[in-house]
Image (cartoon, rainbow, N blue to C red):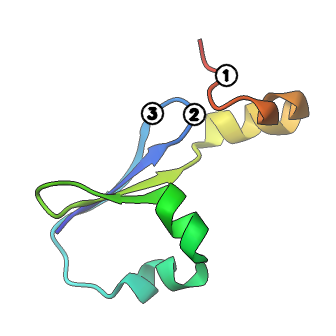
């Protein structure tokens, strides 16, 4: 099973953990409540995990322009 991290705003792949044996608590998934898990973590048909996160560029854009928080996507 692989874990893929993608930016929720621009879709850029932020990270990838290849076919390693791990416990999801090692990734911090146990720190999320049920709603956060449902929104941020998806499993695909191959059994891989896709995690929604935020990249440095989008984080900087949000810090410099807080009004962007109201949009699901602000990258054109």
Q: Looking at this view, is 39 or 69 the one in front? A: 39
Q: CA distance from mark 2 to mark 1?
A: 7 Å
Residue 53: image x %, image y %? 54, 52
Disc 3 marks which residue?
11
Residue 72: image x %, image y %? 64, 32
Residue 70: image x %, image y %? 80, 32
Quadrant the N terminus occupies: bottom left
Secondary structure state at the residue bearing disc 3: loop
Number of callouts: 3
Q: Earlier in the sequence, mark 2 or mark 1?
A: 2
Marks 3 and 2: in contact by CB < 8 Å?
yes
Q: Looking at this view, is 27 or 70 the one in front? A: 70
Q: Looking at this view, is 71 or 19 the one in front? A: 71
Q: Residues within 10 Å of mark 3 (few under 14, many from 20)?
A: some
In the image, residue 29 sits, relative to residue 40, either above or below, namely below
In the image, residue 63 sits, relative to residue 45, either above or below, namely above
Q: Residue drawn 57% across and 33% down?
A: 9
Marks 1 and 2: in contact by CB < 8 Å?
yes
Disc 2 marks which residue?
9
Quadrant the C terminus occupies: top right
Q: Residue drawn 48% across and 51% down?
A: 52
Disc 1 marks which residue?
74
């Amino acid at each position: 099973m692989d874990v893929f991290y993608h930016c929720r705003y621009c879709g850029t792949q932020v990270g990838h953990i290849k076919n390693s044996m791990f416990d999801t608590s090692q990734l911090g998934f146990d720190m999320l409540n049920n709603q956060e898990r449902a929104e941020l973590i998806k499993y695909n048909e191959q059994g891989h995990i896709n995690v929604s996160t935020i990249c440095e560029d989008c984080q900087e854009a949000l810090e410099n322009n807080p009004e962007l928080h109201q949009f699901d996507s602000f990258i054109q």
